[in-house]
Amino acid sequence: MDISRPMLKRLAIAGAVTLAVAGLADVLLHAAWAQNPFGAPKGAVAEPQVSGIIGWLLAKQSEFYLQMSKTIRAAKTDGSAVWALLGISFAYGVFHAAGPGHGKAVISSYLVANEETARRGIVLSFASALMQALMAIAIVGIGAAVLNVTAGQMCGAERVIEIASYGLIAAFGARLVWSKGGGFFRALRSWRGAPSPLVPAMAHAHGHDHAHHDHGHSHDTHERVPHDHAHAHHHDHNHPDHVHDEHCGHSHGPEPSALAGPGGWSRGLSAILTVGIRPCSGAILVLVFALAQGLFWAGVAATLLMGLGTAITVSAIAIIAVSAKGLASRMAAGRDGGGAILLRGIEFGAAALVLLFGTGLLLGYIGAERVTCF
Amino acid sequence: MRRLIQCFFAVAMLAVTAGAAQAHPHVWIVAKSELIYAPDGSITGIRHAWTFDDMFSTYALQGIESKTKGVYTRDELKPLAQTNVESLKEYAFFTFAKAGGAGSQKKEKFNDPIDYYLEYKDSALTLHFTLPFKAPVKTPALALEVFDPSYFIDFQLNEKDPVTLVGAPATCKLSVQRPTDGSAQAQTMNEQTFLNGDNSNYGAMFANKITVDCP
């Protein structure tokens, strides 16, 4: 199975990069606090009885979050504290996103459901994180800074946006399920009807071809041209009536080339809108706090850096999701009919997940980050 | 194929852990509570004083008018206090009481809060309110937990005198268990907890447990 090796390597690299970024941020921040006279004493945060990765993530998030208000206060008298604030905000973003909140889950599922490239995953992650940050800035900027509404009123607006965003996720998921369902059931049908596993060696050879093409495919994260090439190739190989026909169905509606091209972005845009419309409560709190200290711009900068941190983590998650899917397609390609089912099934499952997320959030079965209304 | 399964298992793990990690506190409350006893030894209610963290206090004060900048009177904060107690109802006031000895415990319900007000001091808001029991509780053992099941709010009991008994019979003994004190019963949280447990209630792992035994 040497085919999968590059993919595994990439997975490993993606994981390592995430860890490295997180670890580095941690180290840098501790250094920053040590130098900053306003940095809070280390023991300020009560460490809960937690262990493992989750416990660590929880503890770090709380730690960074608590530091934010202290640094903003400090920035009032000492401008240089703003640098610490920016660092903390960035780190908070990285850790906050380490769990795909619904937004991150939606992006990853969307990428898996569609034959998306890692590069597009990164772009989507950054765009949606930026939109999220801008939404928070807009809500606080207009609501608090201009209209001077109360927290309760702002919260009411947030609630409306929240419900709208859940509705959007559900709708987005329904659309994905609709388009993915076709491919899945077609694959299922033809697998049942196929004279499958006993098909001669030829099919086997095809499988191998596939694997190689997919290999080329995975590289199109860097260049689009070979991608098209690989795909065209794909098609040529595929269309004769053999078992692997569904593999072609891969590309569901529009061709991948069209997706990456102009116009193909409309679908990506709906993903960005779905995810980015709902601002993070943490960002809103920080912005209002900064505004009250007369340092709104510092809050804006902090929010943008939080977004940057979030985007980096979400990108890493997106890369893992896409790589896992790539690995699956490579492995499935080596198998007969069942492989296609598996792939279509994964895509269909990912699409269903988005729909479930949306409806679950909408009906309150899944508790998302609560909007601070009290 | 095995590698494939492993891979997807890893992704699933990531999704599960990630979902859990998302809910982390955005609001910190330092809590002080009083248990109010009637002369006959029954408990009539709980009086809470919850102090919010710097950031949330500032957030909550956004748009609230005050005569003197940075100073808020109890009257000026009245509407906010009202909103607070009203919305706390949705979360059962984050206060969960059970009466009775082990094995025969019964959940006790509360009426709407009374005597509530907000106080602004040292750039922190403190919400005072009394939760009366639906009916006064006469019990040899009362177990009280203060926590947010979704862990959006982190409750910490006050360092000094977190809980006081007001008018309790002299034989009553109070014990307090913090989630952070590392006592034997404090649960450790790890991946296993999240995979096994009901995620929606994992804030319970950060619960402050108060027990009163009146033999």
Image: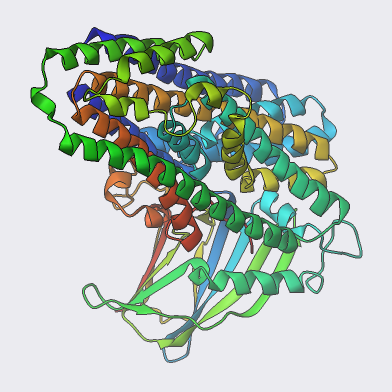
Q: Which residue is drawn at 63% across and 31% down?
A: A127
Work out which residue is located at the far right of the displayed protein and give it.
B67
Q: Which residue is drawn at 16% across and 37% down?
A: A193
Work out which residue is located at the far left of the displayed protein and give it.
A198
Residue A91 appearing in the image:
no
In this view, the residue in front, B132 or B84, is B84
On-image quarter of the N terminus of chain B: top left
In this view, the residue in front, A359 or A202, is A202
Residue A60 x, y percent position in the rendering: 51, 34
In this view, the residue in front, A367 or A166, is A166
Work out which residue is located at the far bottom of the displayed protein and give it.
B40
Residue B123 x, y percent position in the rendering: 75, 53
Number of on-image labels:
0
Residue B74 x, y percent position in the rendering: 78, 71
Q: In the visual, does B4 lie left or right of B91?
A: left
Q: In the visual, does A278 lie left or right of B66?
A: left
Q: Residue at x 73, y 58 (%)?
A: A154
In this view, the residue in front, A33 or B150, is B150
Residue A275 appearing in the image:
yes
In the depicted structure, whether residue B180 falls above or below residue B131: above
Q: Quadrant of residue A55?
A: top left
Q: In which quarter of the image is residue A249?
A: top left
Residue A24 x, y percent position in the rendering: 53, 18
On-image quarter of the C terminus of chain B: bottom left
Q: In the visual, does A70 lie left or right of A342?
A: right
Judging from the image, the colouring scheme is rainbow
In the depicted structure, whether residue A2 falls above or below residue B12: above
